[in-house]
Amino acid sequence: MDKIAVFSGNANPELAKDICKYLKIKLSDALVGKFSEGETRVKVNENVRGKDVFIIQPTCPPSNDNLMELLIMIDALRRSSAQRITAVVPFFGYARQDRKDQPRVPITAKLVANLLTVAGADRVLTMDLHAGQIQGFFDIPVDHLLAVGVFIEYISKLKLKDLVIVSPDVGGIKMARAYAKRLSAELAIIDKRRDSPEKTEVMYILGEVAGKNAIIVDDMIATGSSMIEAVAALKKAKAKSVRAAISHGVLSGPAIERIDKCRDLEELLITDSIPLDDHKKHKRIRVLTVAGLLGEAIKRIHNEESVSSLFD
């Protein structure tokens, strides 16, 4: 492991420290700050020549700052003669625009993929992409991990009976099926109509949820409107209890206020792919760490071992 170096930007330094603790190495030293006019400043403070370098940097809010830090760190390490640079992006920002669903809109997921490649990244390690096909936007190898195992480990300890896994929309069926299969649970889907990017209207539920313990699974929670609508629909359909397991807790805008008002939600499970600020902490929000999952993937990539078992 003397040939490995793990760096972190300012997006999620605690996760980077936990990953290094798993790998039993020290977090490498780099200055990542700003010049007086606001431009991102990066200086690598140790020798990385010939090393296998990993940069832990989710592109979560503030997305532009964190993305620029990642790009500039990649450039700095490439110019420092690192042998290989892997961008570890637990949360891949700008992923929601992955196709032209309206006239005259960008495909930002492809743009960011191009930026990472041009900056000098040799491969990308990410988790629970908003859409799996984003992997195809890269011309470099992408390892796409799933947080399902982390959530199932916790859910199994609850020893809930009559479980039903709920997908909040048709696009999340594949993820919901993975949970249902591992937990030997039934599957339900909420069919909804989206009135605007922030507001949704739930239509009806496909599947039986009455008298069951429901768990909503999704890749991301932003303002929380979709989840709150789903919780209301499930309780109206006589679900016994409702929990949510959502990989990336962006929790923007009125999300915390909505969670506080939603008494029917037993618990919201998220991962530490995005750091949870103090003002966003809530008694019904539980953060599960993915440091072990990412650390194991980093170790296997460095040792040129198979990572495929971690995708399941």
Image: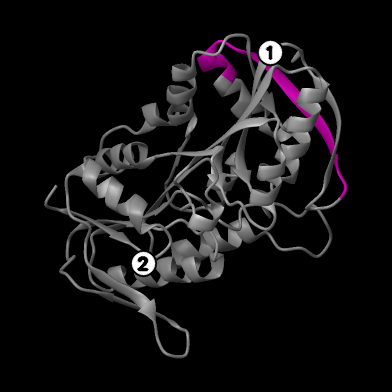
Residue 243: x and y, percent? 62, 28
Is residue 223 visible from the viewing direction of this image? no
**Residue 104 sits in quarter:** bottom right
Residue closest to the eye, 18 or 297: 18
Q: Does 157 appear in magenta?
A: no
Circle 2 sits on which residue? 74
- Residue in view at x 54 percent, y 57 percent: 279
Residue closest to the eye, 167 or 237: 237
Residue closest to the eye, 235 or 163: 235
Q: Amino acid at mark 1?
A: Lys
Q: Amino acid at mark 2?
A: Ile
Q: Does 182 appear in magenta?
A: yes
Q: Quadrant of the C terminus?
A: top left
Q: Which mark is residue 212?
A: 1
Residue 185: x and y, percent? 60, 12
Q: Is residue 163 left or right of residue 11?
A: right
Is residue 120 visible from the viewing direction of this image? yes
Q: What's drawn in magenta, residue-wise?
A: 180-195
Q: Is residue 39 above or below residue 96?
A: below
- Residue in view at x 22 percent, y 67 percent: 29
**Residue 61 sits in quarter:** bottom right
